[in-house]
Every structure is written in structure tokens, then in C-alpha cells.
Image: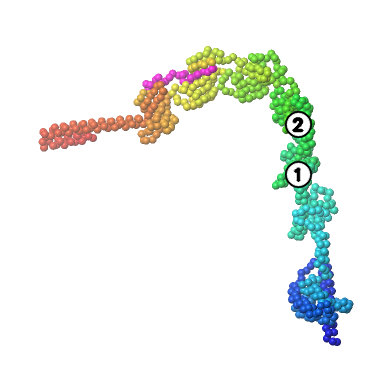
Amino acid sequence: MSEEAKKAEKATKEVAKTAAKKTTKKEVVEAKAEKPAKEKVAPAKKAKKEADAPAAKTAKKEVVEAKAEEPAKEKASPAKKAKKTVEVKKEAPAVAEEVPVAVEEAPVAVEETPAVVAEETIVDDEAPLTVAEIIEEEEEMSPENFDWDSFEYGMKSMSNDERTSLEKMYEETLSTSVEHEVVDGVVVQKSDRDVIIDIGGKSEGVISLNEFRYNPELKEGDSVEVLVDKQEDKTGQLVLSHRKARAMRAWERVNSAFETEEIVSGFIKCRTKGGMIVDVFGLEAFLPGSQIDVKPIRDYDAYVEKTMEFKIVKINHEFKNVVVSHKALIEADLEEQKKNIISGLEKGQVLEGIVKNITSYGVFIDLGGVDGLVHITDLSWSRINHPSEVVELDQKINVCILEFDKDRSRIQLGLKQLDAHPWDNLDTDLNVGDKVKGKVVVIADYGAFVEIIPGVEGLIHVSEMSWSTHLRSAQDFVTVGEEVEAQILTLDREERKMSLGIKQLTPDPWTDITTKYPAESKHKGIVRNFTNFGVFIELEEGIDGLIHISDLSWTKKIKHPSDFTSIGSEIEVVVLEIDTDNRRLSLGHKQVTDNPWENYEAVFEEGSIHTGTVRNAGDKGCDIFFETFGVEGFCPSRHMQKEDGSRLVNDETAEFKVIEFSKDAKRIVVSHSQLNKDAAKKEKAVDNANKAAAVKKTASAVKKVQSSQEKTTLGDLGGLAALKKEMEKGEK
């Protein structure tokens, strides 16, 4: 066999070997597809790929060079093709030997395929490969494009498009769910505690049965809304929540209904402070008591566990609070009806209505779709304390239209206007000065209202209740409900006003005041009130007099009358002056006794010394009370110093010298320090007198000695010594 034939045979074997590798690759890919999960390529495989890369590039380069040397459009013989293929393949074994482990991973597949490949090769001999086909085949067999997964795991080879299509088909079998989204699920299983939900994912979720308390009829196969809380927890379990899903969907529905003003249906769950709790789409909404109906609700419990229609009127997005109203639906229906009713109203028209609500200030009447107010003053001609005294709830009554406002839909009604005014029924014979009897209905600070007949009242002013002039309250004379007799003082039938008086039923005490209380007469009275300038004394009911503060005492200095007497005390007074026109009496208290200042002039002469007690000591001085005479004097501050340098204090008793006396001004000024000064002067005068006497005596003795010196001799010196002793004794 020639060398060329040998080379051709060798090339054929190489082609058969390449086909065997392709078959092995296909089987590996099929085996890989059967495995549940892909495994990572071994480190040896990666090393082989990296090692084969340079060899493949070199082989490709040699093939391109061989192709360039051939003439254009010239076909190579099978032998030459095989020779070229062998030359290209010569360098590959060296690279493959560097990674023997990868080749040994599938020895069985390689050994079993040669016979089959040989047969395929024989068939392919009829169509020899071109150079381009060989290059393409070599590119497919290069390490970069080799499917190592199929080779390693025995999976069947497939294209990228087939792989992508298969992955897409697999993903379509699974539902796509995102965390914190609401999806639909199917109840797979229900137990006494839990419910298993299938949302079409890799696993199923478990939800507590408590979240389905509102739906006791839940069964397997039912579709429910759930919230994907977590795709996988720590244990790989899907976490779902039906309660959160209901809340989220309910909040979305509530917001949508609020924006579109949709009428929603709600279940009233329970009563709460100020209203009701309503279940709307699974959320708890608040229904105020005033929004339940257009009329006040007396029994809230009657609406509990009832399903009603509502309108969402307010939403707080921060706190997720919802406020609903049933009244808004009713008002919308009645609004057009109100307009029709109001348009046909006229003043003075009498309509029939039902008492809808009673308040302290009036009664609301339902006129058949529109409400009107009867004020408490328009319920009855007589004075009443509360509207319930006249009408009752749900009572049908006739009312008269007084005023109405079409724009504001306000209607003012009256009930008493249906009857004649009581003043029209008042006795025409009643005149000013007549006596009438009535019942006290109201007492105010300024007087009392007396009802003569139902609907006709007269006012008794507090000044007309007593002849006394000092201020008193009407409650001191009458009480509510008391029947009294009074005299008509004024009567105006047109203005429908009447004034009454009680004191007019008794004689006026000032009629003979000069006879009962002549000037300079002494009487006893009661202290009723104080002012800064005096005291009001009541001699009898209706006769009061004033004692000026200067007429309270002859001797005491009074700053306020409360320092002298007290309210309610009895005091003796003298009538000083009478003013009958102005009904005024001037009284005095000190005039009850003689004026002591007539005698004080001789007692408190200037220079006299008296014992007194200090009172009201201050910066300017102090008052000195002479208890023996019951009179006070004043000691200036500069005259309060004592002998030791200190000052006199309150309640201290000392002697004082009168330095000033005024009978007209009723003023006595005394001094304590002046006594100390006088004592010092007196002592000094005595000392000076003693010194002068001593000097005079000494001078006389000296003169006597001098006169006797001329006659004295040395023998008389003893007599001189005796004289000296006598002089010294005199000085002592």
C-alpha cells in the first residue's frame, strides 16, 4: 500500500473518531436532560477548555493557509482532504494529554461508537467534505463551542433556541408572584386549624383558619385573595395572609368609592361612643350618631347587626380612618323635596307637623321633608321653663309659619300664635292704682315677674318692694310660686306692659317723719351698711340715716367705720338734720355724750406731763392713747427717741410732755424725748449751781486767809494748818 493510501486510511479513521465524539456528545446531553438539577463543570473540564483553545486556533490557521495555496474552484481529492485533516489534527493530541481526566470520564461511550461511526463514514465517502465544511466542523469542535455539560453528564445536545424555548415553557407553568402583592389562590386543604392555599408557585402556603372567621362556609376548591408576605421564610416556606389581602383590597375599594361617590353597603357591628362601628369591605368605619338619620336617634341598639347603605364622607389617609354617613343619602333624596315645599310656603300659613326633637331652646317640627323650629318663647303665651311642658315627641300639632329663608332652608314656626293674645282678654276695668293678685313666675336681680292671668305678667321692681332705700335683693321679699298682692303702678295695653308695687300697700313712713324723729332727738338703730365716709343706720323699715365718720367719736381717730362698729350692731344716735324732700336723715353718735374737749384745755396745757400707750407706730410718728381721759394725742417721729437711743414701739407705755394743744382742731401733740432733754438740762443746771457755790465759798475762805496773814506770826502757823484742813473739807 502506498503512502498516500495509508494517509487516506488514517484520515478516514480520524473522521470516524470525530463522528464518534459527536455521538457521545449527543448522548451526554440527553443524559443531562434527565437529571433533576444541573451540576457544575469539574475543574478539570475548565482546564481542558483553556488548554485546547491555543491548539484550535493554530489548527484553524494552518487550514486557512493550505486553502490559500490551492487554485480557485479546485476540488481536492479524498486522499488529500484526509491528509490535510490529519495534519490539522496532529497537534491536538498533545493538548489532550495534558488533561487526561476529562477524557476518562466517559470511556464506555467512546469505545461503543466506533463501529457505527465507521458505517456512517463509508456512506459519507460518496460526498467528500469540502475545505469550508471542514473548517466549519473544526469550529464547532473547538474548545470554545464544545458542550462540556453534555459530555460530562451524558445529556443530549440541543441548540440555544431549544434550550430557551424549554426554559420559557417551564416558567409558564409557574405563576409569577411578587412579595406584598395580592393574588388569587385556591383552597387545597382545610383542617380544624389551618387552610392550605395554592397560588401556582413552587410551594403552597398555610394560613390560620381564624382569618376566615367571617366565612364559615369555606371549603376546598374555593378561590380566595391572599397577600404574598414572603416568597420564602427561613425554612423555605411560602408565607401568605388572607387578612392583609382583605385589608389592602378593602382600602383600595374604599378609596375608589370615595372618589367616585359610590354608595356602599356596610354591616353595623356594634355601638361605640358617639356613634356606630360599620364593616365596609372588611374595614371598620365610623358612623356618627348624627349621620344615621335626618331625625335624632333615640335607640342606637336597634341598628346593631343591620346592613345599610352608606356614603363615604371622609377618609384620613394617615391613620386610615373612614367616616360614613347614611344621613347624606336621605338628605340627597329630600333636597329636591325641600325646595318644592319651601317654594310653596307663606307667612301666616298653618301647617301640620310632627314633633321631631325637643331641646332646651325650642322644638323641631317635621313638616314632611323639611324641618322648622318653634322657639321656646313661641310655644306658649305663658312663661315656661322647658318645651316638654307643652309638647311631646312624635306629637302631631298645628303650627304657624312666622319667618322662612329659602336660601338657607330655615323656617321659623310658632304655636302660641294660633291662640288669641291673653292681653286681649285682660279685664278692661283694670286701671292704675287697682290691687291685683298673681303668682311669682320669675325672680331676677332687678325684680320679680308676677303672672296676673295666663300670658299676662307685671314687673315688681326691687325698689317697689320696700320703703327702705338701702340696696336689697328681690329674693329677700318674694319666692318663685308665691302668690302675692300688688298695686298697679303703670298699665300700657298697647305695648302690653305693666308695673306693680308691693310697698304701696303699706303707709309711707316718711309722711310724719318730723313728728316721729324730730331734730336733736335720741334713738336706737341697726347698722345696715358701711361706706368709706360713714355708716347707714336703719331706724325702722323704710327710714334710714347716715352717720358721717367724723360724727362717730369725739376723741378717736377713725380711718374706716368698720374699726368702730359692725353690721347688725345696735347703736345710739342723735337726729342732726332732716331732708323730707330727698328722704335723707343726718345722724350722729358722738353727740350722745358731751364734748370732752371743753375740759381737755385745762388738763392738756402745754408743758404738762401725762402717761400714755403707743399705738399705730410708723415712720411719721405714732398715736398716744391716754386711757385716763379716753383721748388720743400724736407724737412725731423725732420725739419718739428714748434715753438709751432706741425708739418707742407699739403697746409701750411711757410719759409724754404736751408740746401743742388745739381745742378747735381737736389736736394734742406730745413728746417723749423732750422729757429726757428737760431732765438733762435740769441736772446740768443743778451741777452748775453747785459749782458756783463752791467757787464762791473758796473765794471767801481765801479772802479770810489773806486778811489774817499780816497779823500772823510764825507761832500762828499751826492755826494756818487748821484753816487749810477746813477749806479742804468744805470742797469735799
Comparing 12 with 564, the one in front is 12
User: On residue 258, which mark appears?
Assistant: 1
Secondary element under disc 2, as helix, strand or loop, is strand
Q: Was residue 433 drawn as part of the magenta stretch in this picture?
A: no
Kindly identify which residue carries mark 2. Answer: 371
Q: Which residues fall within the magenta stretch?
A: 582-603
In the rendered view, tell whether residue 626 sits above or below residue 79.
above
Task: Determine whether, in the image, residue 715 is placed left or right of residue 407.
Answer: left
Secondary element under disc 1, as helix, strand or loop, is helix
Assess disc 1: are there few (<14), some (14-19) or many (≥20) residues with their C-alpha within 10 Å of its C-alpha.
some
Residue 102: give x, y in percent of width and height: 78, 75
In the rendered view, tell whether residue 492 sits above or below residue 353.
above
In the rendered view, tell whether residue 724 sits above or below residue 533.
below
First reached walking from the N terminus: tag 2 or tag 1: 1
Q: Is residue 11 visible?
A: no
Residue at point 18%, 31% (across, down): 700
Comparing 429 with 463, the one in front is 429
Amino acid identity at mark 1: Phe
Please identify the residue farthest to the front as the structure is shown.
72
Q: Quadrant of residue 173?
A: bottom right
User: On residue 94, which mark appears?
Assistant: none
Comparing 681 with 397, the one in front is 397
Residue 506: give x, y in percent of width and height: 60, 15
